[in-house]
Every structure is written in structure tokens, then in C-alpha cells.
Image (cartoon, helix red, strand yellow):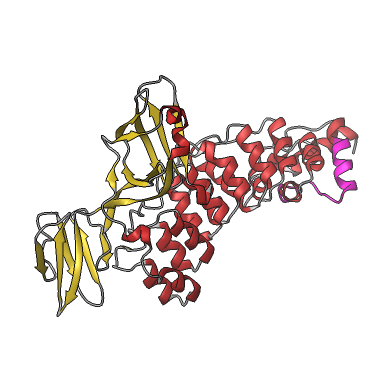
């Protein structure tokens, strides 16, 4: 059999694997044989999984299509990504293989990079526009997966490409328990007060159920509402107790803090804060963020006795002696149960536990701010405007409230912006 016939038979035997044969192919086959590879789809995939970028190039020089799909529906690119083999991914891209950029295929590549803890690969994919944009809301985002696995560096890389997925990631991170990840997500705008749509669980509830003590402590200090109840009427404390997480139980069982008991803070909206004229430019050193909490309900629980609960409207309204299912005045909130603890629910479906003498809070996030030497306490909501009066009066507006920061801008001085950061978690 002469040489041309031999090459023809070789091409025929390997079917669709080879695009053609010739001297370069023969040399590539010899190099592959020298490394212990035979010419097959399975061996091509094996080289990609092993991170052997040179062998992958030789397979292609031998005539193997770089986009080949084997009998198990695997591709060299997909297997290289799953194994975190960035050199092979780069080689295949250089050989003309296209990376998926959007949607679930791209998100799956990013999730695979996260699972393999391949930061170099994750950077490569993001640098090549593999962002997973357009991922359906119900799909697990790469950011959420990185948060759950406690991969802080991966979270940092993914955050700029994950707008709108920060809250989902906070819920996942709460279950994973990494406090560095949780701090990153809160700073990025995820709220510790937000509830999961399917369960009404807060991040604190999820962390407590998982027994993540350090995460529970951070979320608690960041302004989480420990009296919030999930859709089954369970609090973070209930779930920690059911899971036998004694340290979490001890933390969540402490007496209400001064911050939790505090009522009657002044509204920042419309306030005039008097300062020495020389202080006006140093507002950020005078207006201090103490924390973040939910908006106070317009009533307070006074006492519980004989299956009934007594409330009064704030600030000093008439007492209401109620039994379960009764509306609490005309507030849109109803008494849900009295024993073993008082629980209420609102028209929106949100549920909350209450303690006598402790204001109930549920709804919008408000910042708790302290001002000046007298340490007056104010509550601020986005959109609130207030003035700083000194030799020159200035007006500011609250732009955004998060558990770790409040953003303001001046309505008097164009371009002046101020960010107040929470000192405890800065």
C-alpha cells in the first residue's frame, strides 16, 4: 500500500474526526503518540480535561475539529472550563472556538469557573465578555454561587457584571456564612431587611437556620430585624433553636438593645440642624450613621393577658384590647396569634413578632443618624431634605439608605456629595 492510499484509509477510519490529512497531520499524530494519546474524540476530551493545551493544539493540527462533540455530548471547551483549565480555554479560543457571552450557557461557564475555584479562568472569561447577561430571574447566578461558597475574590470579580443580582447573592451568602462576602454584598446595595419572595425569609433567618454564628452576628449588627417571621411564622431564633445551634440561640435571645427599644427618634425630613458656621463643610463628621432599621409601625404592644393583647397607637393613642384576627386600629395590620408569642401580619402578607414595650418595625429601611455634641437621634428615609444652619445655610437631600452607608447630596452646592459609613462595620 503506497503512502497516499495509507493516508486516505486513515482519514476514512476516523470518520468525522479529521478535516483532512497531510504531512503536518502526520507530525501531529506522531507527537500525540509520543505523549500516549490515540486519535479519538475521547482522547481529545481527555487532553482538554488534563489541561494539556499543547496536546489539544496537536489534535487540531491532526485534523480534529476543535468544536467536536463526543458521544456523551461533551466538548473540549466545556470540559476545560469545568476543570478550570484556563490555558486550554485560551488555546481553543485562539483556534476559533466561540465563547458563549450571554444567558444560561455563559452563566454555566461562569458557575463552572467558580466551582473549580479558578480565579484566573474567571478573569479570562469576564475579560472576554462572558458575563451571562440576560440570565432568567429564577436561575442561580454565578454571583450567588460564589457567595454561597464563600469565595470573596470571585464575588469581587463578578459584582460589576451582576447588577440586580446582589440580593439573591446575599441570601445565598447568608447560608454560606462568609462575613467578608456578606459585607461586600451589603456595601453593593443588598439589604439585610429584604425578604425572599418564596419564603419571606430574611438573610438573618437563613443564617440562623444554617447555624452560621459569625454571619448572624454581622447581620444582626448591620440592622437586621430579628423579630421578622417567615411565611411559616418562624423567627431566626425559632429556627436556630430547632437546629440546635446554641451559640446562635444565645445571641438572638439577648434582651432588646437600646437601639431596638428606642422610640420617638426625630424625623430628619424638614429638620434644621444648627451648627457653628465653620462646621458646615464637615457635615460627615457631625452626622453619624448609627445603624439601619425598618420603618416603625404606628402602634406598640403594651401587654398580653388571657389570650388577648393590648396595643396603643403611637405616639399616645387610646389602648386597644384585641384578640386574634382583630385589626389593630385602622392600620392594615392584624393580630395573628397571642400564644406562645404575639405575632401580627399585614395586608401585604408580611409577618412580625412583637414584644411589649419594643416598637414593631417592618417595611422601608431607615437610617438612624446621630447629630452634633448633643447627640440628637434622627431617622432618615430616601428623599428626605434637611438644612444645616450656620453662618451659611445649606440644604441636603438623602439619596440612598443601606445598612452600612447613607448617601447625601447638597441642593445648595452643585456637585457636593457625602457618604456616611457605619463605623462598626466600616
Residue with the most extreme top position:
414
Say left or right for 252 vs 67.
Answer: left
**What is the x, y in percent for residue 320?**
10, 65
**What is the x, y in percent for residue 143?**
52, 46
Say left or right for 146 vs 372.
Answer: right
Which sits in the foreground, 376 or 60? 376
Identified at 42% across, 35% down, the residue is 407
Residue 47 versus residue 322 in the image, above or below: above
Quadrant assignment, res 314: bottom left
Tally of numbered discs: 0
Residue with the most extreme bottom position:
306
The reply to whether residue 76 is visible in this rendering is no
The reply to whether residue 191 is visible in this rendering is yes
- Tell me, yes or no, whether the highlighted magenta stretch contains residue 154: no
Residue 85 versus residue 299 in the image, above or below: above
Magenta-colored segment: predominant secondary structure: helix
Look at the image and tell me in which quarter the N terminus lies: top right
**What is the x, y in percent for residue 387?**
32, 30
**What is the x, y in percent for residue 347?**
18, 55
Which sits in the foreground, 271 or 112? 271
Which sits in the foreground, 276 or 201? 276
Q: Which residues are magenta?
A: 26-43
- Tell me, yes or no, whether the highlighted magenta stretch contains residue 34: yes
Identified at 28% across, 36% down, the residue is 271
Say left or right for 87 vs 2.
Answer: left
Residue 98 versus residue 41 in the image, above or below: above
Which sits in the foreground, 399 or 28? 399
Amino acid at each position: 500500500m503506497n503512502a497516499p492510499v495509507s493516508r486516505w484509509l486513515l482519514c476514512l477510519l476516523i470518520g468525522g474526526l479529521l478535516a483532512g490529512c497531510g504531512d503536518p497531520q502526520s507530525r501531529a499524530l506522531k507527537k500525540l503518540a509520543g505523549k500516549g494519546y490515540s486519535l479519538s474524540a475521547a482522547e481529545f476530551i481527555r487532553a482538554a480535561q488534563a489541561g494539556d493545551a499543547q496536546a489539544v493544539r496537536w489534535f487540531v493540527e491532526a485534523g480534529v475539529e476543535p468544536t467536536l462533540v463526543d458521544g456523551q455530548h461533551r466538548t473540549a471547551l466545556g470540559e476545560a472550563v469545568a476543570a478550570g483549565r484556563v490555558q486550554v480555554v485560551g488555546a481553543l479560543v485562539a483556534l476559533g472556538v466561540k465563547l458563549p457571552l450571554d444567558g444560561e450557557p455563559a452563566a454555566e461557564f461562569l458557575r463552572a469557573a467558580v466551582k473549580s475555584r479558578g480565579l484566573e479562568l474567571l478573569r479570562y472569561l469576564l475579560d472576554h465578555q462572558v458575563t451571562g447577561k440576560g440570565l432568567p430571574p429564577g436561575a442561580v447566578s454565578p454571583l450567588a454561587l460564589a457567595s454561597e461558597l464563600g469565595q470573596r475574590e470571585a464575588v469581587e470579580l463578578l459584582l460589576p457584571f451582576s447588577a440586580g443580582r446582589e440580593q439573591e447573592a446575599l441570601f445565598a451568602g447568608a447560608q454560606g456564612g462568609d462575613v467578608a462576602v456578606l459585607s461586600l454584598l451589603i456595601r453593593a446595595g443588598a439589604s439585610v431587611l429584604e425578604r425572599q419572595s418564596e419564603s419571606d425569609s430574611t438573610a438573618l433567618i437563613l443564617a440562623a437556620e444554617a447555624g452560621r454564628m459569625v454571619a448572624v452576628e454581622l447581620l444582626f449588627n448591620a440592622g437586621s430585624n430579628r423579630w421578622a417571621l417567615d411565611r411559616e411564622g418562624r423567627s431566626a431564633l425559632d429556627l436556630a433553636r430547632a437546629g440546635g445551634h446554641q451559640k446562635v440561640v444565645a445571641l438572638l435571645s439577648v434582651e432588646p438593645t437600646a437601639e431596638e427599644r428606642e422610640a420617638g427618634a426625630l424625623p430628619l425630613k424638614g429638620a434644621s440642624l444648627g451648627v457653628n458656621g465653620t462646621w458646615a463643610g464637615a457635615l460627615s463628621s457631625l452626622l453619624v450613621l448609627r445603624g439601619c432599621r425598618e420603618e416603625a409601625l404606628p402602634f406598640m404592644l403594651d401587654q398580653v393577658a388571657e389570650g388577648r393583647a393590648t396595643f396603643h397607637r403611637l405616639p399616645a393613642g387610646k389602648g386597644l384590647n384585641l384578640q386574634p384576627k382583630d385589626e389593630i386600629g385602622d392600620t392594615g395590620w392584624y393580630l395573628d396569634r397571642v400564644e406562645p408569642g404575639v405575632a401580627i401580619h399585614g395586608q401585604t402578607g408580611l409577618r412580625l413578632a412583637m414584644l411589649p414595650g419594643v416598637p414593631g418595625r417592618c417595611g422601608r429601611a431607615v437610617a438612624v443618624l446621630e447629630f452634633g455634641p448633643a447627640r440628637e437621634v434622627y431617622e432618615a428615609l430616601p428623599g428626605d431634605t434637611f438644612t444645616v444652619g450656620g453662618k451659611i445655610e445649606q440644604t441636603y437631600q438623602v439619596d440612598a439608605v443601606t445598612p452600612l452607608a447613607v448617601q447625601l447630596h447638597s441642593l445648595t452646592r452643585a456637585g457636593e456629595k457625602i457618604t456616611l459609613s457605619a463605623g462598626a462595620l466600616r
